[in-house]
Image (spheres, rainbow, N blue to C red):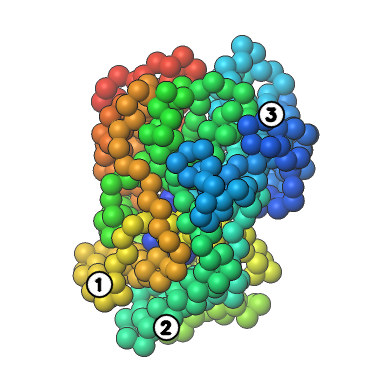
Amino acid sequence: MTRTPDRIRRFRLALAGLAAAALIAAGCTLPAVAPRTDTGEAAATGTAPTWRACPEVADELVGRGAPNVRYECARIKVPRNWGTGGGATTGPGANETFEIALLRARSTKQRDRIGSLVVNPGGPGGSGVDTAVYLSFGPAFGGLPTSVTDRFDIVGFDPRGVSRSSPVKCIPDADLDASFGYDPDPRSQESFDGFVALSQRIGRGCGDRYGDQLPLYGTEQAARDMDAVRAAVGDDKLTYLGYSYGTLLGATYAQLYPRRVRALVLDGAVDPWQDPIAGSEGQAKGFELAFGNFSAWCAANAGQRCPIAPDARAAVTSAVDKARVSPVRGDDGREATAGWVFYAIVSSLYTESGWQELAGAIDKLAGGDPREIFRLADAYADREPDGHYSNMFDANLTVNCTDQDEKPSVARIRQLQSQWRVKYPLFGPPLAVGLLSCTEWPGGRDPYPTGRADGAPPILVVGTTGDPATPYEQTGKLASMLGVGRVLTWEGEGHTAYPQTSCVTEAVDAYLLDLTVPRAGLRCPAR
């Protein structure tokens, strides 16, 4: 199958399940490039959905479908407000519904079917429909092992507010361009105040459009939707693979419906107990670690693989500094400002395979060519060549801000910006300033639960020691909170682990297929 470089990067980012972070629109998330058209007929809540063939989704995403795989799509209706679990009859969204889009990828070689493996790629804002397509392509393309696809339907759903599922769209493309292009560390008071004003404008626009409906897009509501998905595919118990933010969604489901869990794989764990400041600082530390690992790799691979060696840190930092005062202009007139350079860096650190791309992009930028910088940053932002964005960051902002029950003051954020600049020079200030997005958010809050999943079977929590976006320290915390978590460690680089190496793959597959829980303390080597 032929892939352009952009498609390869989108594919990698999608499978990584980019994490919830406090960057720009309150988070990193995965690209979603499938069509926004209806993918099936609606079904009433609690009834069997009507499935129809939809090969066009795979065609749009990757050029064709995977060999020996059928794609079917459907839509189900869920209450806008689940209330205490049965659907609210008063308050915002009472007696109204959202539509949830589903895609089912089924191997024509399937045998001894176990059921459906429901997948979520993270974000929040990532498309599970897209992810089910990506994962259907098998191990040669980074997808799921045939041992899994031969026994499960792979079912992706777009969570409420995301892509094809009653999408939230309230941030103009111009404001997203301004956010991504803005100085990631606005030092002068005037520049900082400009970002505050931009955050206020974005929040006001979303509040004006959705009003008291905004709190209905939170994680707990989406987790209750997952139980409707489980019922729609006909499974008595849920088998689930969640990446990054998808681990939080899966953990919430386990707390709400512990006895409806068959097996949950939570890869790239989010610590549900952390407050927004702790979460952002953890990511600042995680990205600095990953950047240090990239710099060490560069020093050991000077030459064609890393043309910015021997001091990659100095080269990258210099590129950001120069972009502040004299951004390189592309052939189309677009300027590679410090913000766009920064997001190209962020994009490249999610996978170890992105390190060589980053080194090449910085080298070309120094030579006056910003095209690779824009390619990397745009793949992260899901920005099309014409400047149009998907609703990925609209949904990301809405969900993250709804989930938070605390919001630091503007003065506190300004203080953190200075403090984190000392501790985490490249990533600390942007992650501090990014907290403004939810501080200026107008919608109400609906925090998710943080407790044990008593009554659930063992839940597999997977962590990567070099993960920048969901630092490894969070893995044990999520497992501990659930009370039934079993940790699997990958001593590798990048965001999320399954299916990266044979050790990780064998352990996860045995759990999914046979419910065999890995031995306590299992650590898989990087290679």
What x and y, as percent, mark residue 132?
Answer: 61, 37
Label placed on residue 412: 1
CB within 8 Å, label 2 to label 1:
no
Label placed on residue 194: 2
SS type, badge 1 = helix
x 53%, y 33%: residue: 227
What x and y, as percent, mark residue 52?
Answer: 78, 34
x 62%, y 23%: residue: 234
What x and y, as percent, mark residue 226?
Answer: 53, 36
SS type, badge 3 = loop
Q: Of the two numbered discs 2 and 3 on the same chain, state the one appearing first in sequence.
A: 3
Label placed on residue 101: none
Kindly report the distance in space between the C-alpha atoms of the residues bearing marks 1 and 3.
50 Å
CB within 8 Å, label 2 to label 3:
no
Residue 298 in sight from this viewpoint: no
Residue 481 in sight from this viewpoint: yes
Q: Of the two numbered discs 1 and 3 on the same chain, state the one appearing first in sequence.
A: 3
What x and y, as percent, mark residue 410?
Answer: 31, 75
Kindly report the distance in space between the C-alpha atoms of the residues bearing marks 2 and 1.
17 Å
Which tag is nearer the camera, tag 2 or tag 3?
Answer: 3
Task: Say if 235 sits above or below 243 in the image.
Answer: above
CB within 8 Å, label 1 to label 3:
no
SS type, badge 2 = helix
Quadrant in which the C terminus appears: top left
Residue at mark 3: 48
Which tag is nearer the camera, tag 1 or tag 3?
Answer: 3
**Could you tell me the amino acid type at mark 2?**
Gly
Task: Say if 167 sits above or below 371 in the image.
Answer: above
Q: Of the two numbered discs 2 and 1 on the same chain, state the one appearing first in sequence.
A: 2
